[in-house]
Image (tube, coloured by chain):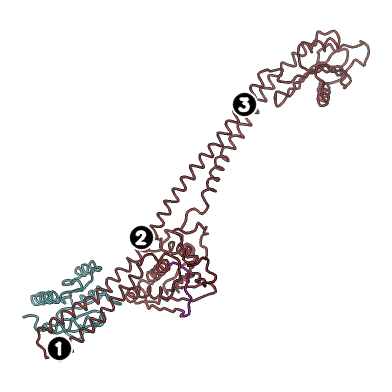
Chain colours: A cyan, B red
Amino acid sequence: MTTDSMTVLLVDDEPDFLSVVARRLERRNMHVLSAGSGEEALATLETHPVDAVVLDVKMPGMDGIETLKRIKVAYPEMEVIMLTGHADLEVAISGMALGAFDYLLKPADIDELMFKLRDASRTRMRA
Amino acid sequence: MTLTHASHDSFRWLAARVVLLSATPVALLALTVCSLLFTAYGHDAQTPFGALVRAVTAPAQSVADAMERAATAFPGATILHVADERVVQATGHAAPAPMDAEARELVASLGGPLTTSMHAGERFALRAAIPPLPGSPAMAAVSIAHGTGQDDSAAGQAIVVSMPLRLLFPQMEYAWGMTIIVSGVLVMLLLYNSLVFSGYVQQKLSSEELRRRALERRMVEANRLSSLGTLAAGIAHEINNPLSIMTQEAGWLEDLTEDGLPAAELAGKVRTAARIIHTQGARCRDITHSLLRLSRQGAVEAGAVDVNAVIEEVGTLSQHRCTTQRVALRMETDADLPPAYAAQAHVQQILLNLVGNALDAMQGREGTLTLRSRQEGEAILVTVADTGPGMSATVQSRIFEPFFTTKPAGRGTGLGLAICYGLARRNNGALGVHSTEGEGTTFTLSLPVMPSDDDMPQPGGEHRIPAMPEPQPRSEGEPA
C-alpha cells in the first residue's frame, strides 16, 4: 500500500477538526502533521517532508487560495487537496486552476479523503 | 427616501394654478389686441358722424334752425348751442355737467376765434368716444356764422351734437353682449379645465404614490433579506465547520467499535468524542438561535427593545466575518441602559446594515469595529464605529441619498443607508454620521427611550409603526 508511509499535512483553523481527522487518518496508517493556519503550514513544510496537503479554503488571515499559491511556488510537485463548503465551490474550482490536485466538499467522508489521498500519492509516485 | 412630501390636495391646487397662470398671459394678450381693434374700428366708424353733422347744420338760416335740423336728423341726441365758451341752450336730453365741459372743450378745439366772416360749417371737430362703449357719446362741433351780423358777440358760436353710440350704431349692444358672453364662456372653460387637469394630476399622483409605497415596502424587505443573505453565506460556513467535526467524530466512534480496545480505554475515547460533539452541537445551536431571532416576523410593532441584546445578536452573527477579515469586534454596552421604544426588527435591520457597511469599509485591512450603546437624555444612542478609510465631506453629505453608493458596480445598491435612515425616522429616531478621512467612520443611531408607564400615550403602549415613513421633508445632507 502506497499510503502506509504517506505523510499528510492537515491545514484548518479548527483545532477540533484537526484533532479528529488526524486521529482517523493515523488509525488508517498515515503519518499526520497539523497546522492551524497558512503561515504555520508553510513553516511545517520547510522542516518536514510531506507527501500531500489537505487545505481548508476558508481561514482567517492567509486564506486557502493564498496558501495554495505559496505552496505551489515553493513546492511545485506538492499535491494539495482543497476542503471547502458549498458556498466556496467556485473558489475551490479556481484552486484547481492554480494547481490543486482535487477538492472535497465539507463535511467530507473520511473514505473519500483517503481515496483522494491515495490518488494523489500515486500521481506523485509516477511523477 | 420619499419623492414627495406635500399632500395631494396642495398638488391639486398647484396644478390648477399652473393652468391658470399659463392661461393668464394669453388672456391678457387677447384682451389687449381686442381692445386695440375695437378702438380703431370704433374710431373709424364714428368719423362720418362729424361730416354728417356739418352737412345737416350748414344750410340752416339761424341758430334755432340749425338746432332744429340737428334734432330732426339725430333723434335722441343732445344738441348744445355754445357761444363765447358758454352753453347757451340745450335741447334733447338734459345735458349733464361733464357733457357741458366736454362740449366747451371741443368748441375751443375748433381753433382760433370764430368770427362772423366765416361761413357756416367752415370749421368742425369730432370727439369720438373711446373706448366705444354703447353708452358713451360721440360728439361733433360745427362752427356757425349766424347771428346779428355786425355784432361781435356772434363770434365764437357753435353747435355741438352729442349722441350716444348705441343710437348711432344700433348693432353695437348686440356685439358687446356677444363679446361678454363669449369671454365668460372662455373663462368658465378655463376654470373647468384647470379643475379637470388638477383632478387628473391628483389621481395620477395618488396612484404613483401608492406604487411608490408598495415599491418602498418591497425595497425595505429586500434589504432585510439581502442583509440576512450576506450573513447566510458566512453562517453556512460557520455551521459547516462544527458539522464536519461532528461527522468526523461520529466516524471516529465507528472506527473505535472496530478496534476491540479494552473497555476502559474505549470509554475514555468515547467520552472525549462525545464532549467534542457536545461542544460543536452547542456552537450550531447558538448560530441557529441568533439567526431565528433575527428572522422572527412580527417584531415590527413598536415596543420595548433591549438595545444591548440586539447589539449582542448582531455581533454574534457578524463574528465570523470579523474573524475572517481579522477585524477586532468590540462591544461596549451600557449595562444600565433603559429599553428603547422602537420596532425590534427595524433596530436589527439598521444595525446589521451599519455593521455590514463598516466591515465592507475595512475590507482588506485590519481594524476595530466598535458597537457602543449609551443613554443621553431622552435618547438611546447606538454607535457603530469602524477604523476604515473614512469618507470625504462630499460623500458624507450624500451618504443617505437613495442610490448613492461608493461600492463598485454590482456590489452595493445604494439603498442600504437610505433604508436605514427611513427606518430610523419611522421609529422617531435619527441616524447620523461622523467621519474623518483616514481615521474611520462612526454612525450614530438614536432612538427614543421607552416612556415609563404613567406617561404612556396609550394603555398597552403598542402601536403600529406606520408602514411608510411620514412624509417629512429632508434637506440634503441634513446632519440628522
Residue that appears at 81% across and 18% down: B160
Mark toward the viewer: 1 or 3: 1
- State which region is magenta: B334-343
Residue pointed to by mark 2:
B409
Question: How many numbered discs sit on the rendered protein?
Answer: 3
Q: Do circles 1 and 3 both sit on a common chain?
A: yes
Q: Which residue lies furthest to the front in this view?
A: B459
Q: Which of A41 and B353 is in front in this view?
A: B353
Amino acid, disc 2: Ala
Tell if the residue under mark 1 belongs to the same chain as the one under mark 2. yes
Q: What residue type is labelled 3?
A: Thr
**Rendered position, B300 above or below B103:** below
Give the residue drawn at x 73%, y 22%: B128
Residue annotated with mark 3: B179
User: Is residue B252 shown to the viewer in this render?
Assistant: yes
Badge 1 is on which residue?
Answer: B266
Query: What is the spatial separation of the Cα atoms under label 2 and label 3, in whole angstroms?
Result: 65 Å
Q: Mark 1 belongs to which amino acid?
A: Leu
Q: Which structural element holds mark 2?
A: loop
Q: B152 or B428, which lies in front?
A: B428
Q: Is residue B149 magenta?
A: no
Q: Which chain carries label 2?
A: B
Tag 1 near tag 2, CB within 8 Å: no
Q: How far apart are marks 1 and 3 (CA)?
A: 115 Å
| Location of residue B463 in the rendering, given as x and y in whole percent from the top left corner | 47, 63
Classify 10 Å Cα crowding around label 3: few (below 14), some (14-19), many (20 and above). Answer: few
